[in-house]
């Protein structure tokens, strides 16, 4: 990280501590930063989609413009974060960062699958997410996440197999030889 980035991070952490703001947890610095980064990315996406900046004179008569935002709570690695997703008049804006109907960012699914692989029950996984991230994830949601993977695994294991598979076995040995104190 460049020195200026390190200084910026140190300044943010010092300011959060001086104001009594926790770094993690509900309303903590990480949640606020995640919210701002997601919202900035979404604003950049709608600007690219429309072809002009917010409040730009080009927007007049373009046929499509910004149409406010809608609030959406997304479950992230740092807990639930409420973001404002921008909309357009024509309804053609499809965000890529936080897709329509998406309620979880990718890290949560991997965490649920990892905990499930460790043979935790759905209730234990739900309790873990509530304890660590302050996020209430229903047992039904956890079941849906694990079922998606199980369906894919079942499909893969029941796929038709070819009669012959070419196989190449490679065997090698790495031998170090010293000749006059030099490794060849």
Image (tube, rainbow, N blue to C red):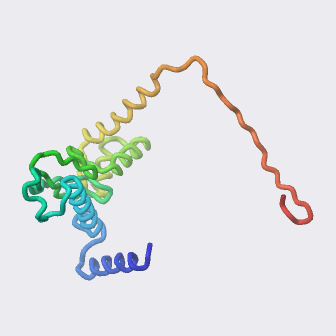
Q: Indicate the position of residue 124 as horizontal and vertical percent values.
A: 33, 46
Expressed as whole percent of the image width and height from the top left, the position of residue 42 reads: 23, 57
Q: Is residue 170 shown left or right of residue 108?
A: right
- The residue at the far right in this view is 180
Question: What residue is shown at x 11% (from left), y 56% (from top)?
Answer: 66
Quadrant location, the C terminus: bottom right
**Relative to 40, residue 3 above or below:** below
Query: What residue is shown at x 38% (from left), y 32% (from top)?
Result: 150
State the image coordinates of residue 174 (x, y, percent, origin top left).
Answer: 78, 49
Q: Nearer the viewer, residue 78 or 11?
A: 11
Q: Is residue 27 above or below residue 119?
A: below
User: Would you identify the image quadrant in which residue 76 lies?
Assistant: bottom left
In the image, what residue occupies the spot 21% across and 60% down?
Answer: 43
Q: Nearer the viewer, residue 17 or 156?
A: 156
Q: What is the quadrant of residue 51 in the picture?
A: bottom left
Total labels: the figure holds: 0
Q: Is 150 above or below relative to 86?
A: above
Residue that protrudes farthest toward the top in the picture: 163
Which of the two residues, 156 or 21, is positioned nearer the viewer here? 156
| x and y percentages locating residue 46 in the rendered image | 20, 55
């Amino acid at each position: 990280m460049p020195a200026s980035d390190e200084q910026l991070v140190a300044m943010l952490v010092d300011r959060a501590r001086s104001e009594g703001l926790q770094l993690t947890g509900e309303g903590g610095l990480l949640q606020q930063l995640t919210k701002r980064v997601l919202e900035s990315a979404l604003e950049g996406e709608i600007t690219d989609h429309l072809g002009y900046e917010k409040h730009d004179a080009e927007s007049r008569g373009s046929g499509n413009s910004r149409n406010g935002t809608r609030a959406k709570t997304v479950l992230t690695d740092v807990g639930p974060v409420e973001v404002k997703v921008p909309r357009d008049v024509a309804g053609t804006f499809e965000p890529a960062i936080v897709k329509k109907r998406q309620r979880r960012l990718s890290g949560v699914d991997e965490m649920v699958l990892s905990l499930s692989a460790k043979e935790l029950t759905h209730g234990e996984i739900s309790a873990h997410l509530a304890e660590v991230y302050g996020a209430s994830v229903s047992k039904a949601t956890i079941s849906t996440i694990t079922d998606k993977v199980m369906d894919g695994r079942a499909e893969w294991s029941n796929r038709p197999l070819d009669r012959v598979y070419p196989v190449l076995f490679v065997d090698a040995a790495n031998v170090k030889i010293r000749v006059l104190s030099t490794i060849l």
